[in-house]
Image: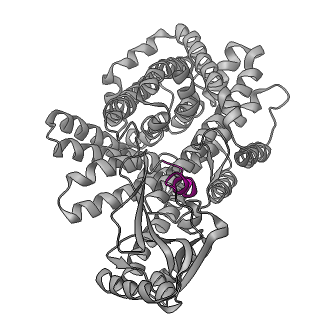
Amino acid sequence: MTGIIKAMGLVFGDIGTSPIYTLTVVFLLLQPTAGNVLGVMSLIIWTLVILVFIQYDWLAMGLSIRGEGGTIVLKEILAPLLRDKKKAVFITLLSFVGISLLIGDGVITPAISILSAVEGSVLIPGFEKTSQGTIVLISILIAIVLFVFQSKGTERVSVAFGPIMGVWFISLASIGLISLSEAPEILKALNPYYGINFLIENGWKGYIALGEIILCATGGEALYADMGHLGAKPIRQAWTGVFVALVLNYFGQGAFLLKHPDAKNILFEMVFDQAKSLYVPFLFLSIIATVIASQAMISGMFSIIYQAVTIRIMPPLKVGYTSVERKSQIYIASVNWFLLAAVVFIMMEFGQSSRLAAAYGLAVTGTMTITGIMMMWIFYLKKMPLYSLLTLFITGVDVLYLSSNFYKIPHGGYWSLIIGAIPLTLILIYTQGQKQLYRMMNFMPFAEFIEKFNNAYATAPKIRGTALFLIRDIQNIPPYITQTMFSHGIVYEDNIFISIMSRSDPYGVIGFYREDIANGIRSFEIQVGYMELISAEDILREAGIDERAVYYGLEDISARNPVWKFFSLIKRVMPTFIRFYEFPTEKLHGVITKVTM
């Protein structure tokens, strides 16, 4: 039960707050005729079944590495199955796009959720004339408080998230059930015929409406992405209850719309019509629910960025810890302020939730399509034909929704792509820059290094104690090591080459000695799961290593190409991996190597 309650707060905030705005924005495009209401309701229900229940709850959550899910996990499962190098590169690029789209989607989620909830205040007697500018200002203030609070840690407050969301879902189900009893004919929408008939009768308009209908499933990808935090079982159990609450509420909104076709802000007008005395508490509850949804998104962004850093597709960002008990409670200041700036900009740019809906959905459907493609490929290569065919159908549905969102690009959807393009550009420049840098550096072959080291170790005076040197590939000795030992004559009695390797699975930390390289040089390897938060100093102490100095390489990059100039800027302003993995700062010695790219 505890896991289920936690899942409601951590996983289902986004999809749980979509009833605030989904039906409202859909019927900005459509006339609320009985046929349209039934058709839209049918499409909403079956979208939740196909894209959330089947794609994520059943299929995606069945593909994991040690209980961890997400785009990076799908890539790690699929990559070893591919023998063609070009296909592996394509899948890697696809995973980069998926990560970037999630970040782009993560900016719009709090903006549309908080705005739509605050907009409900205009139904309170005396607040009818509240200007849209005031609503935007209040929404921005809520967002600022939320993001500023991140550095303080959310562990204590997050304990209350699950119960509050539980109350929210009970409220959604209750008001939906009351409204549903007034127009039970809405239940005919359970028949998919009404959804299909709606698309046929409305043609192009119905196709465009799919771009708004998909908003009911935004946040569905969180079932899979957050699986490692709680485990599959409590998320699946919680989703069953959440699904029932959402369906009852959507049916209730549909029934209310049949009786009140002039309704504009459907959920809030439905509550106001049913129980005016409870409207203000419900409004406050909805605002709290959107804040919780936003908090879950922010925490998710921190996890995604951390994964990207540990598998070295993004530069090492400074990570802070907000809990002494749980190292998974992390805070990345640069990501936090980027998200806040983007959220505030989006709120100011669009001004109201109905306009913001024109930009929402593109990144979500892109992420779902990428997930579908990767799952289909995995099932095909694992020779599971029935799953392959089912995933092919689901991916077709994903593509249908994705294509219906293309019309949003000139109407504000381009902001979603621009925001997503920022991390994608960073990933591509950083990964390609690292490869180019590696090619341009003057590495010394292992055999030549050993010969020179043996001679230096035998003849040169040695410094007492142990020195650590960071290295990736023992066969290619980086110039900072040869420069330190042979040019500067710094040779210690005990020299240990430290390599930190990212594991393909999310959890697990192993530190162990490899075979000795030569007399005076030992090799120690640390293998780290990409979700692990480690302190290299702790691992070294556990292995009995007590060094006097830690040496690492720094590159002074000169370049004429603007892309490599930007890469050089990234290398200068971002922390080094030596700081990211928390080596003892008082013992660090950075050795600069000049590189022309």
Q: Residue furthest right?
A: 126
Magenta-drawn stretch contains 81: no
Q: Going 60% across and 39% down the picture, which residue do you hit?
A: 326
Using the image, determine if residue 381 lies above or below residue 458: above
Along the horizontal axis of the image, is 545 left or right of 441?
right
Q: Which residues are magenta?
A: 532-544
Res 89 quadrant in image: bottom left
Using the image, determine if residue 557 lies above or below residue 117: below
| Residue 362 position within the rendered picture, expressed as x and y whole percent measured from the top left | 45, 50
Using the image, determine if residue 256 lies above or below residue 223: above
Q: Residue furthest top?
A: 181
Using the image, determine if residue 471 lies above or below residue 591: above
Q: Going 48% across and 87% down the picture, which residue do you hit?
A: 483
Q: Nearer the viewer, residue 222 or 404?
A: 222
Snapshot colouring: one colour
- Total marks drawn? 0
The answer to whether any part of residue 291 appears in the image is: yes
What quarter of the picture does the C terminus occupy?
Answer: bottom left
Along the horizontal axis of the image, is 446 left or right of 353?
left
Q: Nearer the viewer, residue 527 or 181?
A: 527
Q: Nearer the viewer, residue 271 or 584?
A: 584
Q: Going 70% across and 42% down the picture, which residue do you hit?
A: 153
| Residue 69 position within the rendered picture, expressed as x and y whole percent measured from the top left | 40, 41
Magenta-drawn stretch contains 542: yes
| Residue 117 position within the rendered picture, expressed as x and y whole percent measured from the top left | 68, 34
